[in-house]
């Protein structure tokens, strides 16, 4: 039986991690070790200059071991595999993230960062993400099938498997695109709104991103825009 470590960056209370754990139970013993709070866009950061605390956590999926950590998603993989689990994980799953992790956004993603920490520790790792919306029909249809397929993929040091599910209705999904490349297109065009200006010339600002969809065939971005599930390998981003 496999030992599967699951984390995320939306926090242990997020709907996506419960759905991922429920599906993963079919493939082994599941250990959920996830941040107690929201930790999006922290990439592969880890905590070095203060202690970390982990605690057992009530979890909505029966039959899994669950712990919350007051740290980053990458911290969770480290603490989970090195201090909580009695045996090293055979696989690390990160997600299901609320929002795509594709194109240039991957470099900011703590979902991907946690998966990369798994790879750095020597464990095969898969990042799962879906559209930040209410329709998850495609995820629910394909998650178990893809999980089963990718668990048999060979481990490649320095690489994670990255899966993104489109937010369309199942009837509009055009299937799976495998071996997609990471798009070089900027997913969000960012700018900063000035919230408050100070007399000394400083200011308080807030980032605002504008989605700028542009089709690019053969990439993760192109696959999602054409209503395909996107599966690809991503090399070390850090």
Image (cartoon, helix red, strand yellow):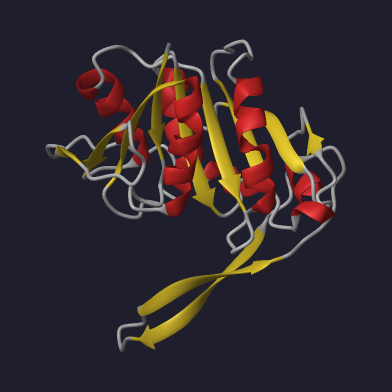
- 78 to 38, vertically: above or below: above
- 202 to 86, vertically: above or below: below
Residue found at x 84% / y 37%: 218
Which residue lies most toward the front here?
62
Quick check: can you spot residue 102? Answer: no
Report x, y in % for residue 47.
24, 38
Relative horizontal placement of residue 209, taking residue 64 as reference (left or right) = right
Dividing the picture into quadrants, the one containing residue 183 is top right
Relative horizontal placement of residue 144, taking residue 97 as reference (left or right) = right
- 87 to 63, vertically: above or below: above
Residue found at x 21% / y 34%: 48
In depth, the one of 9 and 158 nearer the eye is 9
Report x, y in % for residue 190.
59, 66
Report x, y in % for residue 39.
36, 51
Question: Which part of the image, by quadrant, shows the N terminus?
Answer: top left
Relative horizontal placement of residue 98, taking residue 175 as reference (left or right) = left
- 54 to 27, vertically: above or below: below
Relative horizontal placement of residue 133, taking residue 31 as reference (left or right) = right
Quick check: can you spot residue 196? Answer: yes
Residue found at x 29% / y 44%: 59
Report x, y in % for residue 108.
50, 47
Q: How many marks?
A: 0
């Amino acid at each position: 039986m496999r030992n599967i470590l699951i984390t995320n960056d939306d926090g242990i209370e997020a709907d996506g991690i419960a759905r991922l754990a429920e599906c993963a139970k079919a493939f082994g013993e599941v250990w959920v070790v996830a941040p107690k709070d929201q930790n999006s866009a922290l990439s592969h950061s880890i905590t070095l200059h203060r202690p970390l605390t982990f605690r057992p956590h009530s979890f909505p999926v029966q039959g899994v071991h669950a712990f919350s950590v007051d740290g980053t998603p990458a911290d969770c993989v480290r603490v989970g595999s090195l201090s909580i689990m009695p045996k090293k994980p055979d696989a690390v799953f990160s997600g299901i993230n609320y929002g795509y992790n594709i194109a240039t956004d991957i470099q900011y993603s703590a979902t991907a960062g946690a998966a990369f920490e798994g790879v750095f520790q020597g464990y095969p790792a898969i990042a799962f993400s879906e559209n930040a919306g209410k329709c998850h029909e495609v995820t629910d249809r394909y998650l178990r099938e893809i999980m089963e397929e990718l668990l048999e993929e060979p481990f490649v040091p320095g690489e994670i498997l990255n899966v993104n599910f489109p937010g369309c209705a199942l009837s509009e999904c055009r299937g799976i695109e495998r071996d997609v490349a990471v798009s070089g297109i900027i997913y969000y065009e960012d700018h900063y709104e000035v919230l408050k200006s100070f007399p000394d010339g400083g200011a308080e600002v807030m980032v605002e991103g504008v989605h700028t969809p542009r089709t690019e065939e053969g990439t993760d971005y192109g696959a999602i825009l054409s209503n395909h599930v996107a599966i690809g390998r991503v090399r070390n981003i850090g």
